[in-house]
Each structure stands twice: as structure tokens, then as C-alpha cells.
Amino acid sequence: MAQAPAAVSHKFTTKQWLLLIGCGVGFAITGADPAIFSANIADIRADLSLSGSQTAFIASLATLMLAATILGAGVLGDILGKKKMFIVGALITAAGEVLVALAPDFVFLMVARTVVGIGFAFLLGLSLTIVNSSFPPEQRPRAIGMYLAVSFAACAPMPAIAGLVSTWLHWRAGFLVFALFGLVTALIAWRYFDTIPKAAGRKFDVPGIALAAVTLVGIVYGISKLQDGINAASLVPLGIGVAGMVAFIMVEKRVEQPALDLRLFQRKPFNAGVVGGAVFNFFNGGFTLLVSYYLVVVEGRSAAIVGLLFIPAAILQAFAANWAGRSIVVRGNRKTMMIGLSVLAATALIFASLAAGSPMWLVILAFAALSVGNALSQTPEANLMMSFAPRELGGSIAGVKSGLGQTFYSLGPVVFTLVGTLFLRGLASDDLEAAGYTSEDVRRAMEASQGTSTSPSAGGATVLDPEQAAAVTEAIREPFAQALQLTSLVMLAVPIVALVLVHWLLPKRLPGVDEAATPSPPAPAGPHTESGEPAEKAARSRREPSLPGDGASPDPADR
């Protein structure tokens, strides 16, 4: 008779905590660096004598490089080793941040931000799959929740530290802070991460990776340009991205070892994770912009207040993500995700109640609800997408998760702006005409109110001056508040539809996923079936179509 397996402790060891900290800090760097770069963009532009078009390009370059290389970074982690490539990514990021601090001109800065974006791809694309592969099934939901909690908690002080250093010393010094965090992350990974077995015999799908890069860059960049209007600058990259996506699907269906096996999207629970991720990223991007518009345009407050809101929001997200990981153990993925989506629906209702002159506590409540809903949705999303992926595809699946998230995060502000503008034109057309302003004046005033008017078309010369921007926003303050309310009510439909889809796609308990979090006492036959196959894999094979790698066991947790 086989011996019963040793009980798995639900408490994390010191080594496991350090792994979570290393992965969480690596994740946090990818969010904190762009925030500091945007905050210092005016000083960078003045110091390096950048034109308006150069400023707009450099502001998004790291993000575009991240989108271009995220899937390739995940696949390289699967082939060459996740621990090794995560360390490489941390060192690349640190080197790139040093180059940013040393940049004497636009070309040097362009190379530096390209390097930073590539490093981000490894940190973002591999941190989640390392956590997923390093914890046994009984601990994974809590581990993923705690990993996200550490990420959110690190995101709170990191921009503040770099921002203070930039203010006290120089903008260049702020990026050396991120170089230091990158080195610390690499050291933790080298010392405390276990080596995760590679995907034996897997090849690097060059055509698939290249087409994925074209797809993500084209779509993300095209979506970002939609805020300037529907024109060639937005439609051409979107067209290239869509064409790349079609070619990617055709290629991946034909190659023997695809970068992403598309049969994953035949799995309902995996698609439920995709739906949840799409909604919380879309809401996060859209409502973050909406609260900025409300505070600056409607209430006439400083845009810096929005930045201050992110600090308590990140702390709330940390607690919510930790709770979500525990909730998956008790309630399962479906109930936990539906709780998160319900909070996002409540968020839309709270934002819809914001009128001109609403108390500040209501704004804080709306932003807090958005933060909590994001964390409660993201934890089961990550758990579902990683649980239903073959272990040898962990890096590529984590890369796909990040790529989809980035796409929908970029889509949020665009859709919110388009819908809000339609309502605003209907509500304020007479006021604008009476004041002598056009819809283009409104758009540029809204950009100026956030300090984000870096459109290449502006060239730094046609942006409204602060006084004129203030005059435009004053003329539309009341109808603008009404337009934001109507936009929030329209967006309420998004989480409601997602709730229906998640309820349909996910059963109450997922065999081998939800049950793995709350193991029953071992049966006399032990953790294997009569054929000797691990029970977790046997359950997975019964509920899912076979995929390349389902029979392999590159993850120590499967042994």
C-alpha cells in the first residue's frame, strides 16, 4: 500500500515569503516606473530638448516594447528556465534604468527605454508563472493572492520614494531607485527561487512570437491614438494589429510547437479568467481617467490629488488580493470572481452619483471600490488562467494574460472618452457655441487639465495655455459632470454582462482546482490512481482536451 502524502502546511515558509516578495517587487517595478517617467516628462523634455512628437513617442516606448516582447519572454522562460530568465529580466531592467539616468539626448534615451521595456517583459511575464510553479496546489490560490498583495503594497511606496529622490536631487536620480530595486529583485531570485524544470524539447516559435509582437504593438498603439480621433494615425496601426492577429492564428494552428496553443480558448474556465481580466483592466483604465476628469474639470482641483489617491488604493488592493486568495479556498473561483465583478458594478453606480459639488469622501469611496473590485477580480483570474494551462506553457500563458490586460487597460480610457464626449456634445453644444469654443478646444482642454497633452500632432505649439484651458472647462463644468454620470451608467452594463458569462462558464467548484485548495484526508490508495498517474493530472485529463505538455511534469508541484 502506498504511503499517505505528507500534509502540506498552509503557512508559508520564510523561503516562500521571500519568493513572493521577489516576484511582487519585480511586478511592482513595471507599474511604478511608467508613473515616475510620466510625472517627470516635462523636466525630461526640457533637459534633453525634445520636440512634442519625440516626447509623445518616448513616453509610450517602454510600454510598446513590453507589449512586443511579453509573449517571447514567457516562452524563453519556459525553454531556458523561468528562474534564470527572471533574473536576466531584473538585470536588464536595472541596466536600462541606469541608461535612462545617463541619457544625454533623445536617441540614447530611446535605446534606454527600449531596454527597460524588454526587462519589464521578463519581470511581468514570468513572476506569476514562477509563483504558480513554486507552490503546491493546496497553497496556490493563497500564494497568488499574496503575490498580488505584495505587488500592490510595493506599488504604494515605490513611486513616492522615486518621486522624492527626483524632487530633492534630479529627475535622473529617480530612475536609479528603480535600478536598485531591480538589483535587489535579481538577488532575491538568485538566492531564494528554486530552479523550475524546463520544457524539454520545446522550440522557440519565431514566426508566432514575431506576429504576436506585431499584433500587440499595433493594437495597443492604435487604441492609444484613438483618443486623438479616428484617423490614419489610429486606423493604420489598428489595421496592422488586426492583420497580425489573423496571421498569428493561422500560423499557430499549423506549427507543431506553437508559442500559444489556441485550444486553451476552448476551455470555459480559462475563458472565464479572460473575461474577468478584460473587465477589471478595462474599468481600471477607464475609471482612473474618469476620476481625473471629475476632480480637475468638474471640481477644479489639482491633478496631483489623483496621484495621492493611488497610495491608499494600493494598500486596499493588497488587503483585497490577500482576502481573495483565501476566499478561493473557501468559496471557489466562481463566487470570488463574481464578488469582484459585483464590486465593480457598484463602483459604476457610485461614480454615476458624482455630481458637481459632491463631497470628497464620495470620490474616495468610488476610487476605493474600484481598487477593491480590481483586486478581487484579478486574483481568481490569475488562478484560473494558470490552473488551466499545461505546466510547460506557464510562461507563455502568463505572457498572454499580461498582453490581454494591457490591451483592455488601453481600451478603457478610449471608450470612456468616446462615450463621454458623445454625451457632452449633446449636453453642452449650446454652451460651447455661445462661449465660442469648438469640440477640439474641449478635447485639448481636457488633455491640458491632466498635463497629458503630448500628442505628436500638437508639436508642443498648439496646446491651449492654462488660462484658456481653465476658461473652456469652466464653460462645460455642469454638463461635463452630467456626461460623466451618464458614461458611468452605460459602463454598468460591462460587469453585469461579465457576471452572466462567468456564471455560465464556471461551475460552482472546479475539480482539481477549487478542490485542490481544500484537500480531503488522503484515501488509502494514496495520491495516485491505480494506473500510477498523479490524481491532479487524472482529474485534469478527464475534464479537459489533451494539449501538448499535459502528459509531462515539468512542475515540481505535480510530482
Image (tube, helix red, strand yellow):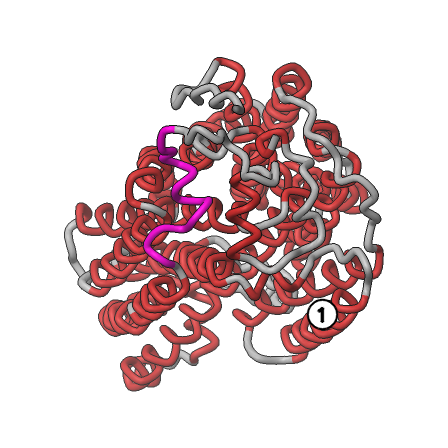
Instruction: Report the span colored magenta.
Output: 507-521
Quarter of the rendering containing residue 83 = top right
> Residue 516, position in %: x, y?
43, 38
How many circles with numbers are drawn on the protein?
1
Q: Main secondary structure of the magenta part?
A: loop
> Residue 217, position in %: x, y?
69, 61
The quarter of the rendered structure image containing the C terminus is: top right
Q: What residue do we see at 60% from left, 63% from top?
A: 455
| Mark 1 residue type | Ile
- Residue for badge 1: 249
Query: In the rendered view, does 136 fall on the left or right side of 299?
Result: right
Q: What residue do we see at 47% from left, 32% from top?
A: 147
Q: What residue do we see at 57% from left, 37% from top?
A: 534
Query: In the rendered view, does 542 fall on the left or right side of 252?
Result: left
Magenta-span inclusion, residue 553? no
> Residue 405, position in %: x, y?
53, 55
Q: Is residue 136 visible?
A: yes
Q: What residue do we see at 29% from left, 66% from top?
A: 474
With respect to residue 113, does 413 lie above or below? below
Label 1 crowd bin: few (<14), some (14–19), many (20+), radius 10 Å: some
With respect to residue 444, does 258 lie above or below? above
Quarter of the rendering containing residue 174 = top right
- 66 or 542: nearer the eye? 542
- 368 or 242: nearer the eye? 242
